[in-house]
C-alpha cells in the first residue's frame, strides 16, 4: 500500500507529506517504546 | 499577520504538528487505558487470589510510570510547536478554552501524583489492598478527566457551538464532545488490550520456562478480551459521532465519508477486518484448550469466524471505482462506476451491525469457556501471530482515525473557499492560514460563534 502511494503520485505534496508524517509518528512511537523497554528490561 | 509566519522545511508545519500529536496520543491513550486495566487486574487479583493478576498489574503499572515521561515530553513539545507555528490560532483557542485548559492542567498534575504514589506504595499498602486499588482507579479517573478536557477543544475545532465563545458550557458541550469522548474512552481499553495481547504474544514465543509460557499465554488472552470486547462497541459510538459531524459540519462529513477522502474509512475497515478476523480466530483456537471441552461451542465459534469474515469483507467493498482520488488511484469511470455491494446503505450497515452481533456472540462463548478455565501454555505459534497482528493494526487504526478527524476540516467549499485556503483550524471560523472568517450570509456570520469570535477585522 505504501509502495502504491509512492509509485502513483510521487510528484504531489499531499500523499508524500502524509507518508512522511506517518513514518515520523512510527519512528517516535517505536523508538520511545523501545527506549522504555530497554531501560526497564534488566530489573 | 502581526507575527512572522514560520514554516517547517520539507514536511511542512501541519505534518510536524500531526507527527507530534499522534505520537503523543499513542502514549497518552495507552497510559489512561493501561492505568484502568492495571487497577482492574489488581482488583481481580484481590478477589480471585490468583497471583498472575497481581504480577500483571504491577508490571503494567511500572511500564506506565516509565512511559509517562515520554508522553508528557511529547505533549509539551507539541504545545511549543503549536505556539510557535500557529500563534494567532493558539491565542484564540487559549482564550476560548481558558477554563478547560486550566482544569486539564490540574487533572494532569493530579494524575501524575497519584500514578507515581500508586506504584511506589505497592508494598507499603500490601495489607490495605482495597485502598491501594482505589489509588489506581483515582489515577485512571484523573486521566480520563484530562482527556475529556482536551476532547472539548478537539471537538470544538470540528463542530464549534452556535454560541458566544465565552459561553463555557456551550463551547464545552459542543455537538461532538460527548460522542468523541465516549469513542476515546472505549477506544483506550481496546487499544491497550490489543497492545497487551501483542506484547504477551512476543514474550510467549520467546519464553522457555513453563511458568512464563503459562503466564504470557494467559496475558495474551486477558489483553484480547479487553481489546476485542471493547472494539465491538465502537461502531455504534462511531455512528453517533459521525452523525454529530454530519449535523454540525456537513461539508466535513461529506469530505471524509463521501468525497475525496472517503478512502480513510476504507482503510479503517481494513484494520477492523484484520483485528476482528485475527481475534475471532484466536478465540476459536483457544477453545480447544478449554478445561471443560464443549465441541458444540467450538463449532459455533468456527461458524462465527466465517460470519466475521463475511461481514468484514462486506465493509471493505468501496462504493465506487474512485478509490483514492488524491493520488489518482481511480479505475474505470471513477465515481460514475458504482461497485456492487459497496453502498453505505444497506450493505455497510449490515456489515457493521452483523460484525457487532457476531462479535458479542463469540465473546460471550469465549467468556463462558474462560469461566471454567483454559490449559495455559499450549497455544500455537500462529495464534500468537494473530495477537501481534492485532497489536500492529490497532496502532494503524488509531493513526488513521486521528488523521481522519483532523483533516476533515480541510474542506474546499464554504465561506473561506479559495485556491489558497486549504481548510479550517476551527470549522467555518479560523482558516488554516490563521485568518478569521468574517463573511456573513443573510446578515448572519458564517462562523457559528458569530461576533464573539470573528466580529473584528479579518478576511472575507
Image (cartoon, helix red, strand yellow):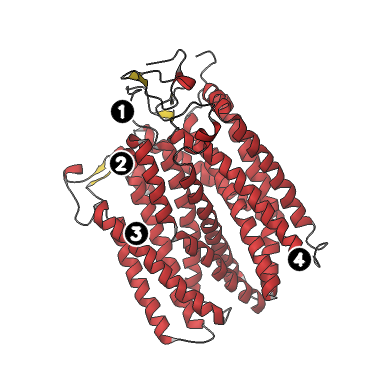
Q: How far apart are marks 2 and 4 (CA)?
A: 59 Å
Q: Where is residue A39 in the image (x, y as percent from the top left)?
A: 71, 53
Q: Circle 1 marks a residue in which chain?
A: B
Q: Circle 2 marks a residue in which chain?
A: A
The structure residue drawn at horizontal position 35% and vertical position 43%, both measured from the top left corner, is A5
Asked if disc 1 and disc 3 are in contact, CB closer than 8 Å, the reply is: no
Of residue B426 and residue B196, the one placed in the foreground of this image is B426
Work out whether mark 4 precedes mark 1 in sequence or the reverse, and give the earlier one.
4
Q: Circle 3 marks a residue in which chain?
A: B
Of residue B200 and residue B451, the one placed in the foreground of this image is B451
Q: Residues within 10 Å of mark 1 (few under 14, many from 20)?
A: some
Q: Where is residue B18 in the image (x, y as percent from the top left)?
A: 50, 37
Asked if disc 3 and disc 4 are in contact, CB closer than 8 Å, the reply is: no
Element on which disc 3 rests: helix
Q: Position of residue B75 (x, y in %)?
A: 61, 38
Q: Residue beneath label 4, please?
A: B129
Work out whether mark 3 precedes mark 4 in sequence or the reverse, and give the earlier one.
4
The structure residue drawn at horizontal position 45% and vertical position 52%, both measured from the top left corner, is B397
Residue B198 is drawn in which quadrant?
A: bottom right
Element on which disc 1 rests: loop
Q: Residue beneath label 2, please?
A: A8
Q: Circle 4 marks a residue in which chain?
A: B
Q: Residues within 10 Å of mark 3 (few under 14, many from 20)?
A: many
Q: Which of marks 2 and 1 is in front?
A: 1
The structure residue drawn at horizontal position 22% and vertical position 48%, both measured from the top left corner, is B320
Q: How far apart are marks 2 and 3 (CA)?
A: 31 Å
Q: Nearer the viewer, mark 4 or mark 1?
A: 4
- Residue B314 visible here: yes
Q: In this view, does B305 lie above or below B339?
A: below
Q: How far apart are marks 3 and 4 (CA)?
A: 42 Å
In the rendered structure, find residue B352 and report the number of the disc placed on it: 3
Amino acid at each position: 500500500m505504501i509502495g502504491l502511494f509512492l509509485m502513483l503520485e510521487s510528484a504531489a505534496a499531499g500523499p508524500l507529506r502524509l507518508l512522511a508524517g506517518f513514518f515520523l509518528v512510527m519512528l517516535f512511537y517505536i523508538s520511545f517504546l523501545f527506549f522504555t523497554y530497554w531501560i526497564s528490561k534488566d530489573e | 499577520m502581526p507575527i512572522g509566519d514560520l514554516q517547517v522545511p520539507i514536511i511542512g508545519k501541519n505534518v510536524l504538528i500531526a507527527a507530534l500529536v499522534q505520537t503523543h496520543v499513542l502514549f497518552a491513550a495507552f497510559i489512561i487505558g493501561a492505568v484502568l486495566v492495571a487497577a482492574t487486574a489488581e482488583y481481580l487479583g484481590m478477589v480471585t487470589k490468583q497471583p498472575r493478576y497481581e504480577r500483571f498489574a504491577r508490571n503494567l503499572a511500572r511500564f506506565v510510570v516509565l512511559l509517562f515521561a515520554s508522553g508528557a515530553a511529547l505533549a509539551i513539545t507539541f504545545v511549543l510547536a503549536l505556539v510557535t507555528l500557529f500563534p494567532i490560532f493558539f491565542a484564540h483557542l487559549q482564550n476560548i478554552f481558558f477554563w478547560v485548559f486550566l482544569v486539564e492542567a490540574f487533572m494532569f498534575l493530579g494524575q501524575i501524583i497519584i500514578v507515581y504514589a500508586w506504584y511506589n506504595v505497592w508494598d507499603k499498602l500490601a495489607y490495605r489492598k482495597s485502598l491501594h486499588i482505589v489509588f489506581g482507579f483515582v489515577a485512571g479517573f484523573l486521566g480520563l478527566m484530562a482527556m475529556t478536557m482536551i476532547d472539548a477543544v478537539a471537538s470544538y475545532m470540528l463542530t464549534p457551538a452556535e454560541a458566544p465563545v465565552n459561553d463555557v458550557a456551550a463551547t464545552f458541550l459542543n455537538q461532538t464532545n460527548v460522542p468523541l469522548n465516549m469513542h476515546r474512552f472505549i477506544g483506550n481499553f481496546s487499544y491497550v488490550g490489543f497492545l497487551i495481547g501483542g506484547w504477551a504474544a512476543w514474550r510467549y514465543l520467546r519464553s522457555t520456562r513453563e511458568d512464563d509460557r503459562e503466564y504470557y499465554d494467559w496475558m495474551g488472552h486477558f489483553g484480547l478480551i479487553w481489546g476485542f470486547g471493547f472494539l465491538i462497541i465502537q461502531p455504534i459510538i462511531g455512528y453517533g459521532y459521525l452523525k454529530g459531524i454530519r449535523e454540525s459540519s456537513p461539508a466535513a462529513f461529506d469530505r471524509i465519508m463521501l468525497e475525496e477522502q472517503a478512502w480513510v474509512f476504507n482503510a479503517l475497515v481494513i484494520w477492523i477486518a484484520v483485528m476482528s478476523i485475527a481475534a475471532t480466530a484466536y478465540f476459536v483456537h483457544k477453545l480447544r484448550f478449554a478445561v471443560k471441552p464443549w465441541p458444540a461451542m467450538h463449532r459455533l465459534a468456527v461458524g462465527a469466524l466465517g460470519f466475521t469474515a463475511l461481514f468484514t469483507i462486506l465493509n471493505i467493498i468501496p462504493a465506487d471505482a474512485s478509490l483514492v482520488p488524491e493520488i489518482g488511484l481511480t479505475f474505470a469511470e471513477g465515481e460514475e462506476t458504482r461497485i456492487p455491494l459497496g453502498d453505505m446503505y444497506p450493505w455497510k450497515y449490515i456489515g457493521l451491525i452483523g460484525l457487532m452481533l457476531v462479535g458479542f456472540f463469540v465473546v460471550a462463548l469465549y467468556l463462558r469457556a474462560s469461566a471454567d478455565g483454559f490449559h495455559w501454555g499450549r497455544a500455537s505459534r500462529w495464534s500468537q501471530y494473530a495477537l501481534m497482528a492485532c497489536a500492529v493494526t490497532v496502532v494503524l487504526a488509531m493513526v488513521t482515525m486521528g488523521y481522519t478527524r483532523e483533516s476533515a476540516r480541510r474542506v474546499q467549499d464554504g465561506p473561506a473557499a479559495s485556491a489558497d485556503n486549504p481548510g479550517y483550524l476551527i470549522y467555518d471560523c479560523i482558516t488554516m492560514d490563521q485568518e478569521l472568517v468574517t463573511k456573513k450570509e443573510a446578515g448572519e456570520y458564517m462562523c457559528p460563534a458569530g461576533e464573539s469570535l470573528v466580529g473584528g477585522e479579518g478576511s472575507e
